Amino acid sequence: MNGNRNEALHRAVNKHRVLIAAHKGTFGGNIIQNTIPAFETALLCGAQIIEVDAAKSTDGIYYAFHTGQEPGLIGTSKRLDAMSSREIETYRLINSNQCVAEERVNRLDDVLEHFRNRCLINIDRGFFYLEDTLKLIKRHRMEEQIIFKCEAKERWLRTLETEGSDIMFMPIIKGPEELALAKRYRINLIGAETLFDTEADALLEKPFIEQCHRENLLLWVNAITLNAESILSAGHDDNSAILHSMDYGWGWLIDRGFDIIQTDWPFLCSQYIKGRSVS
């Protein structure tokens, strides 16, 4: 059954070799992150995966929103997960010009239905509401499109085994032992999201990467540059790709064998990958 569930993912990998995941979509101007317009823009920019954040209202409605970013996006310090859906939907989103836009916080149900049968979708931060998120994926019958990720913790892996064994899953790992833990569970393990801060990290060792590929496990790397402190890919990130060298940034990650690159700049990354393939 899992082979059929994973068919769209394998088709995309076979076609593109390296997949691009657009972090919160692609946004700027009056196109705002975690909205249907941002995800549409990401696909136009060459992404094959859209990364969508999940947050839940006090009355159980899910939204495409990253909690903690309320001040910049809806102009309040109150957390979205402390609001009812009625209150949430009174807010209009703030665009990159710091102007209030017409767009409102998008319901996650609306986002999923809009992109049905169109692309792969990663639901992020859904592990805060794990059982509910698994039910949401099944309710939409989009198991073949949605990639779910969370840390490789036993309590979450047990829930996945009992409630979501058919859903495409990647543990978020900082070491090979965390992937080994996930392998102990009867789940639809398709790969792992890797986090590493130095080039000497065990996750970058050739035998580990080759073993993952022998087992048909995909490796996801975060090239996003979150801030000055967070190092997610040993400095081979969006900033270094754009400001220093794309070979040093995205190219270095591709050469190590990563299959999925999450980026805030999918158009530039996709153009770079296309250029590599013909050079």
Image (cartoon, rainbow, N blue to C red):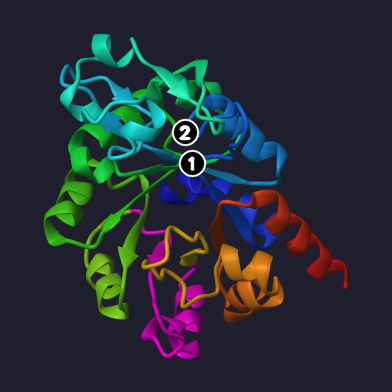
The label number, if any, that marks residue 223 in the structure image? none
C-beta proximity under 8 Å, tags 1 and 2: yes
Inspect the image, locate mark 2, and give the three-letter code of the amino acid beneath it.
Answer: Asn
Quadrant of the image for the C terminus?
Answer: bottom right
Crowd class of label 2 (few under 14; some 14 to 19; many from 20; radius 10 Å): many
Q: CA distance from mark 1 to mark 2?
A: 5 Å
Q: Which residue, given by chain and number where applicable, does mark 2 sit on?
A: 34
Q: Residue at x 23, y 63 (%)?
A: 152
Q: Residue at x 58, y 65 (%)?
A: 239
Residue 251, position in %: x, y? 67, 74
The label number, if any, that marks residue 24 in the structure image? 1
Inspect the image, locate mark 1, and give the three-letter code of the amino acid beneath it.
Answer: Lys
Which of the two residues, 133 or 128, is positioned nearer the viewer here? 128
The total number of labels drawn is: 2
Residue 50, position in %: x, y? 53, 42
Q: Is residue 206 magenta?
A: yes
Looking at the image, residue 19 lies above or below residue 139: below
Among all residues in the image, which is located at the extreme right? 279
Which of the two residues, 208 or 56, is positioned nearer the viewer here? 56
Q: Tell me where the magenta segment starts and ends, as one range.
A: 188-216
Q: Is residue 10 magenta?
A: no
Crowd class of label 1 (few under 14; some 14 to 19; many from 20; radius 10 Å): many
Q: In the rendered structure, which disc, 1 or 2, sits on the residue that comes first in sequence?
A: 1
Quarter holding residue 38: top right
Which of the two residues, 59 or 135, is positioned nearer the viewer here? 59
Residue 59, position in %: x, y? 17, 16
Element under disc 2: loop
Among all residues in the image, which is located at the extreme left? 155
Looking at the image, residue 96 lies above or below residue 188: above
